[in-house]
Amino acid sequence: MQNHSRTAAALGVMLAASVVSAAAFSQSAAYPARVVKFVVPVAAGGTVDIVARTIAQRLSESLGQQVIVENRPSASSLVGTQVVAKSPPDGYTLLATSTTFLSAPAVVKDPGYDPVRDFAPITLTCRVPMVLDVSPNLPARSIKEFIALAKTRPGEITYAASGVGSTGHIAGELFARQAGIKMLAIQYKGNAQSIVEVIGGQVAMMFDQVGTSAPYIRAGKLRPLGITSKKRSQLFPDLPTIDEAGLPGYEDYTINVLLAPAGTPKEILTRMHAEVAKIAATPELHKRFLDQGIELIASPSPDEFSAYVKSEVARYAKLAKDASIKAE
């Protein structure tokens, strides 16, 4: 009799599990049945926002449901990121963000989220190479000359960054460590102020997205020494990469990513990945963004992107520890 009771209980658990599984599958199969929201944890107008809005518009057309963008700007993108981390894992609230998502936990004492535990990665959406800009009055005119100059003035060469752990700060630390030089990071509240200070010569150099720097480079207000990607930029085909100009192996990008709350059904992740991949590969759209220095690109799969996220989080954690990078 006792065995029959155990068997019945086991069957009951299995039946309940199958009902839940069937419900989840049904929900995934019908996805999306209502409006999908992209939370963008930065202000409107920048690369993250522009790319997110473009993808949202195209997704609205392909999915047959409206995809909207909600900006939740804050320091280190923390507020918007935390909102998505705590949202239901049903695919209706997603995070469209940047490299900061991966680096902030390494430098912020209490970011309020774990990039690996609290999120289900969907895909990369774009990557943007940066350019090493120097003030026009700096004597260095190449990467080799800049490194040689920095070695004669250890700790004196300054570079501008838009906050501790920002993409420009990380790029500078990577460059300094790989080149075997010491530089002094000067932190500003925003990128616009950083550019003004480098142009004016108050700061020697900065790493900036190539599209943002382009107008100042063309006007002769900034002198570019190299691109951070392994391939030359379409915007400045005559400008060498840092890798080929004197620091072999150097590579760094600003990336944009799309993620869901942890626990989101795999069917939804796979569907969204496939849709974004189609958008990123659209020839007209791809060319339009390349002309702005932005490469639309999707990861091969959510699983591959998940592995990438884990490796990058570990890389930033090591860099922050080795370079003693910590936000106040």
Image (cartoon, rainbow, N blue to C red):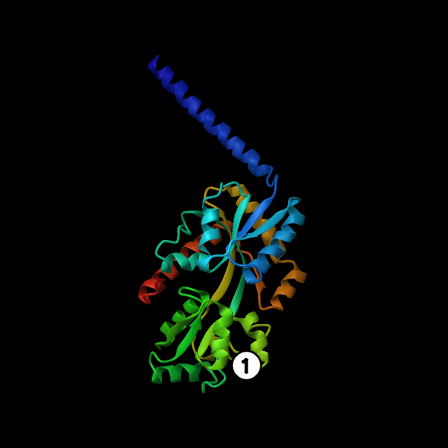
- Give the residue at the far top of this rendering: 1
Task: Give the percent coordinates (x, y) of residue 210.
Answer: 54, 71
Q: Is residue 293 above or below residue 146?
A: above
Q: Is residue 78 visible?
A: yes
Q: Quadrant of residue 248?
A: bottom left
Q: Is residue 229 visible?
A: no
Residue under the image location 47 percent in, 77 percent down: 197
Task: Give the percent coordinates (x, y) of residue 115.
Answer: 42, 52
How many dots with numbers?
A: 1
Quadrant, the N terminus: top left
Q: Quadrant of residue 324?
A: bottom left
Could you tell whether 170 is left or right of 297 in the image? left
Quadrant, the C terminus: bottom left
Task: Give the percent coordinates (x, y) of residue 21.
Answer: 50, 32
Determine whether the residue tagged by mark 1 lies in a helix, strand or loop.
loop
Dot 1 crowding, Cα within 10 Å, few <14, some 14–19, many 20+: many
Task: Give the percent coordinates (x, y) of residue 19.
Answer: 50, 28
Q: Is residue 204 above or below residue 56?
A: below
Q: Nearer the viewer, residue 33 or 253?
A: 33
Could you tell whether 288 is left or right of 257 in the image? right
Residue under the image location 45 percent in, 47 percent down: 85
Amino acid marked by disc 1: Lys
Q: Quadrant of residue 54?
A: bottom right
Q: Which residue is mark 1?
A: 221
Could you tell whether 274 is left or right of 153 in the image? right
